[in-house]
């Protein structure tokens, strides 16, 4: 920044004079400005906890550039505060004199301005580059994708869940499993368990209504277990795992059914299992139908998106106790939203949610400008929101995506949160959140799901032909 300003001033002064070639900025006594890298990981908002700008020795500056100190003080007392006034200041000084000392005096003012005001610019805290990409072809469009706990394998469900295909990290196919029936699956849930040797997915056809999900052995390509839901003996919707997710070590699986208070025999819609024995560890009931689920906060917390209520619920993952509820979207006379996307940060501080569908109210509001504006906002500027868990405050909205939003997941290292929209966009959004530091990757097709690798340096997204893996270089 200082170099640019100095160059601009010398051009303004018409190149009247240059500092002595024997002098250089390296001789100044000013200490270098602290690197922004030391602040990028701070949780405090930008500008609230920064050190004072480094001081510089004005006397030595004058001596370095050969300017009389008494003359220089004329300019020092009216130090410019922006580039425009800096140019005006330099212009005014040319009226006093046309010798080289004036040019050097202007140079001193610009250096002081750079040292004291450069800190007002926000840091370039987050950037991502795509290093390479790898296509994983499958039968039909991919609808769900997941990485193994060590990042050595990736699994994709395709053709509405008829095929489960597993590849190694180099793109070599390990095996493919044919799932017989069971209906179309678009929830985006698939998971590795048992040291990444088995897959969890909604069950095939011809299973009882009590079934929540099934387990397949990858090497043998066969079904090895079917696990009951939170209300065995009751109807399908009160047991089937529409959404589920495993812990990072694959030992815990949390699931949610589509059941809710409106169902006659509703008791529980959340269940947590030990994947080593498939014994239920906990069941719980939330007073909403659940439309999305995530484990976060080092797998201690369970985040839930809901249907038509605009509410996010956070539970203790093991006890099932409700920790907090966040009103993500207010009740509106214009319509209702379904929060089909939820992702929580590794430290448990933040929750991202996205609108995956919304319903417009008719009647008196039909075709009004207000309803149209609300409809547009839900599908664009307000389709993605970020909240602070401890007090439910909205941190930011993300205006660049286009709804419906499909799926989101946080980088395990906390550097960014990734999500896919309905316009072939893969977004990686990183701090500082209010400055909208993000990277958009244009996908070859629309995508239903994504998964971030354990090291956060690869993202697998589903495509119309299977999946694509992006290898990333993340700078923060």
Image: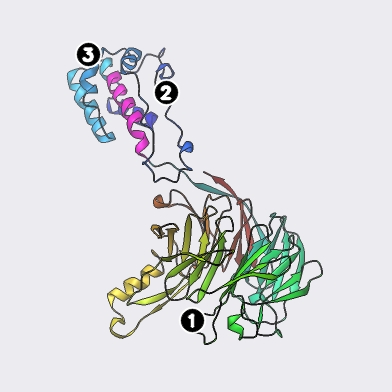
Q: Nearer the viewer, mark 2 or mark 3?
A: 2
Task: Characterize the local packing of mark 2: few (<14), some (14-19) or many (20 or more) Cα atoms within 10 angstroms.
Answer: few
Which residue is at a point 55% across and 54% down the rendered structure image?
A: 346
Which residue is at a point 71% across and 86% down the rendered structure image?
A: 206
Residue 306 located within the stretch drawn in magenta: no
Q: Which residues are magenta?
A: 103-121
Question: Of helix, strand and loop, which one carries label 1?
Answer: loop
Q: CA distance from mark 1 to mark 3?
A: 81 Å
**Pointer 2 residue:** 31
Q: Which residue, as the protein is rendered here, is positioned at the far right?
A: 220
**In which image quadrant can residue 211 be found?**
bottom right
Q: CA distance from mark 1 to mark 2?
A: 64 Å
Q: Position of residue 361 (x, y in %)?
A: 35, 81
> In the depicted view, which residue is nearer to us: 124 or 41?
41
Left or right side of 18 for 324: right
**Pointer 3 residue:** 70
Who comes first in sequence, dot 1 or dot 3?
3
Q: Position of residue 184 (x, y in %)?
A: 62, 79
Who comes first in sequence, dot 1 or dot 2?
2
Question: Of helix, strand and loop, which one carries label 3?
Answer: helix
Q: Position of residue 469 (x, y in %)?
A: 63, 58
Who comes first in sequence, dot 2 or dot 3?
2
Tell me which secondary structure the magenta stretch mostly adopts.
helix
Q: Position of residue 171 (x, y in %)?
A: 72, 58
> In the depicted view, which residue is nearer to us: 285 or 84?
285
């Amino acid at each position: 920044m200082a170099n640019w300003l100095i160059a601009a001033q010398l051009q303004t002064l018409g190149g009247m004079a240059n500092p002595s070639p024997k002098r250089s900025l390296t001789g100044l006594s000013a200490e270098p400005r602290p690197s922004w890298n030391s602040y990028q990981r701070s949780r405090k908002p930008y500008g609230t906890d920064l050190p004072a700008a480094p001081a510089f020795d004005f006397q030595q500056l004058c001596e370095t550039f050969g300017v009389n100190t008494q003359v220089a003080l004329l300019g020092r007392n009216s130090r410019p505060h922006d580039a425009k006034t800096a140019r005006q200041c330099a212009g005014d000084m040319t009226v006093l004199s046309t010798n080289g000392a004036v040019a050097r005096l202007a140079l001193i003012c610009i250096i002081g301005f750079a040292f004291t005001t450069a800190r007002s610019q926000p840091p370039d805290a987050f950037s991502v580059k795509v290093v390479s990409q790898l296509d994983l072809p499958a039968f039909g469009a991919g609808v769900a994708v997941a990485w193994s706990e060590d990042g050595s394998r990736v699994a994709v469900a395709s053709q509405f869940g008829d095929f489960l295909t597993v590849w190694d990290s180099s793109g070599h196919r390990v095996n493919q499993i044919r799932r017989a029936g069971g209906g179309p699956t678009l929830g985006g849930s698939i998971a590795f368990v048992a040291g990444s040797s088995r897959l969890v997915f909604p069950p095939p056809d011809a299973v009882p209504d009590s079934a929540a999900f099934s387990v397949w052995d990858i090497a043998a390509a066969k079904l090895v277990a079917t696990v009951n839901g939170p209300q065995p003996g009751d109807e399908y919707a009160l047991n089937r795992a529409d959404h589920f997710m495993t812990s990072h070590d694959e030992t815990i699986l949390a699931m949610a059914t589509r059941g809710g208070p409106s169902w006659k025999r509703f008791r529980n819609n959340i269940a947590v299992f030990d994947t080593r024995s498939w014994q239920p560890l906990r069941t719980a009931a939330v007073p909403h139908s659940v439309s999305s689920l995530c484990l976060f906060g080092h797998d201690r917390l369970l985040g839930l998106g809901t249907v038509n209520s605009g509410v996010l619920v956070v539970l203790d993952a093991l006890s099932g106790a409700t920790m907090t509820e966040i009103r993500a979207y207010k009740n509106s006379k214009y319509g209702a939203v379904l929060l089909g996307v939820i992702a929580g940060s590794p430290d448990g501080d933040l929750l991202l949610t996205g609108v995956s569908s919304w319903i417009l109210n008719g009647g008196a509001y039909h075709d009004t400008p207000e309803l149209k504006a609300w409809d547009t906002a839900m599908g664009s500027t307000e389709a993605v929101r970020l909240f602070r868990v401890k007090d439910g405050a909205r941190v930011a909205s993300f205006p660049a995506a286009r709804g419906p939003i499909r799926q989101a997941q946080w980088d395990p290292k906390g550097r960014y949160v990734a999500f896919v929209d309905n316009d072939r966009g893969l977004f990686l959004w990183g701090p500082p959140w209010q400055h909208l530091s993000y990277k958009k990757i244009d996908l070859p097709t629309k995508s239903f799901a994504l998964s971030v690798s354990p090291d956060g340096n690869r993202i697998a997204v589903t495509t119309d032909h299977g999946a694509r893996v992006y290898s990333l270089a993340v700078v923060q």
